[in-house]
Image: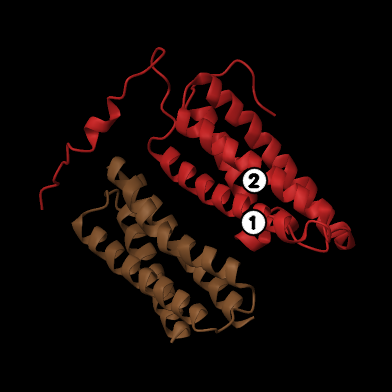
């Protein structure tokens, strides 16, 4: 269950990164559709956060340590919304580039989460 | 499609300023830079806090270096957000220190891995962090120098 979510979040994060990177390449700021995309990715990350905590509460163990696992889950959830808010204040291509960077950070965090959970 | 201009966010910029106009460093490429620096700060700070709280004894050198890296990242993030000429200079110096740190610690970990039973943010030139630790100070210094314009002293 968690692995499927991890892959889903990672893939959608990379898609968001490509999309916003393309917007930056075309010299465009983030638009409504981009924010909907960010919301979808953030919802998936939130679901992952909830599922991860529930699994820990049920007594399952994260190989790399529960504390690290939860910290990474929170970081993964926060990265895209934080970049999204920054892009609200910067209505240029650099706002889009920042969101793309945030999505890449999320994808990297997913890889780390996978390692921490699986050992 | 016409580009909707949101004015709600533009008004936030009219913040009261204590001194004369500060150079805003968080515009354009600077925003991306600040974002990456804050990510690195959060990563490095939480990592070093965790390492020092749980097992400082096993790798004191690596964990001390992680803590130093965390402080440097947090300070650069703060100076970038604050803006202004003094902050710009301070950030420039710290970026240089950061680059030196990455290169020295990176070389050290490659030459003598046994000194580092646990890895640091700057191990192997920041390979665990997609080499961002090496790339960030270079782009940072370029941005900081450009946002000033002509400069009397060239930074090493």
Q: Chain of mark 1?
A: B
Determine the residue positioned at 54% across, 25% down. Answer: B87
Q: Residues within 10 Å of mark 2 (few under 14, many from 20)?
A: many
Q: Residues within 10 Å of mark 1 (few under 14, many from 20)?
A: many
Towards the viewer: A111 or A19 = A111
B93 over A83 or under it: above or below: above
A76 over A30 or under it: above or below: below
The quadrant of the rendering that contains the C terminus of chain B is top right
Asked whether, in this view, residue A100 is left or right of residue B89, the answer is left
On the question of residue A53 being in view, the answer is yes
Residue B57: x and y in percent read: 83, 58
Is the Cβ of the residue at disc 2 closer than 8 Å to that at disc 1?
yes
Label 2: which secondary element: helix
Task: Give the mark nearer the N terminus: 2 vs 1.
Answer: 1
Q: Chain of mark 2?
A: B
Towards the viewer: B16 or B125 = B16
Residue B37: x and y in percent read: 53, 45
Determine the residue positioned at 40% across, 15% down. Answer: B18
Residue A9: x and y in percent read: 40, 74
Residue B113: x and y in percent read: 85, 62
B29 over B144 or under it: above or below: below
Asked whether, in this view, residue A84 is left or right of residue B75, the answer is left
On the question of residue A108 being in view, the answer is no
Q: Which chain is brown?
A: A
Residue lying farthest to the top in this orientation? B20
Label 1: which secondary element: helix
Q: Which chain is red?
A: B
Q: Which residue is mark 2?
A: B70
Q: CA distance from mark 2 to mark 1?
A: 9 Å
Determine the residue positioned at 52% across, 67% down. Answer: A70
Q: Which mark is on residue B47?
A: 1
């Amino acid at each position: 269950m968690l692995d499927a979510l991890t892959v889903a979040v990672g893939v959608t994060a990379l898609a968001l990164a490509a999309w916003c990177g393309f917007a930056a390449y075309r010299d465009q700021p983030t638009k409504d559709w981009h924010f909907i995309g960010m919301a979808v990715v953030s919802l998936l990350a939130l679901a992952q956060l909830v599922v991860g905590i529930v699994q820990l509460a049920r007594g399952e163990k994260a190989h790399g340590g529960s504390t690290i696992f939860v910290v990474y889950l929170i970081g993964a959830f926060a990265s895209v919304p934080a970049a999204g808010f920054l892009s609200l204040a910067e209505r240029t291509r650099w706002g889009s580039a920042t969101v793309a960077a945030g999505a890449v950070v999320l994808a990297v965090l997913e890889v780390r989460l996978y390692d921490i959970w699986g050992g | 499609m016409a580009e909707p201009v949101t004015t709600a966010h533009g008004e936030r910029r009219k913040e009261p300023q204590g001194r004369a106009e500060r150079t805003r460093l968080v515009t354009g490429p600077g925003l991306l830079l600040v974002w990456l620096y804050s990510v690195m700060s959060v990563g490095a700070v939480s990592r070093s806090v965790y390492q020092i709280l749980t097992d400082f004894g096993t790798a004191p050198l690596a964990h001390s270096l992680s803590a130093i890296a965390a402080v440097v990242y947090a300070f650069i993030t703060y100076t970038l957000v604050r803006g202004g000429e003094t902050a710009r200079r301070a950030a420039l110096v710290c970026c240089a220190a950061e680059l030196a740190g990455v290169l020295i610690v990176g070389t050290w970990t490659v030459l003598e891995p046994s000194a580092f039973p646990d890895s640091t943010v700057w191990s192997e030139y920041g390979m665990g962090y997609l080499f961002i630790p090496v790339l960030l100070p270079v782009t940072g210094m370029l941005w900081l120098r450009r946002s000033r314009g002509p400069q009397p002293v060239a930074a090493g």
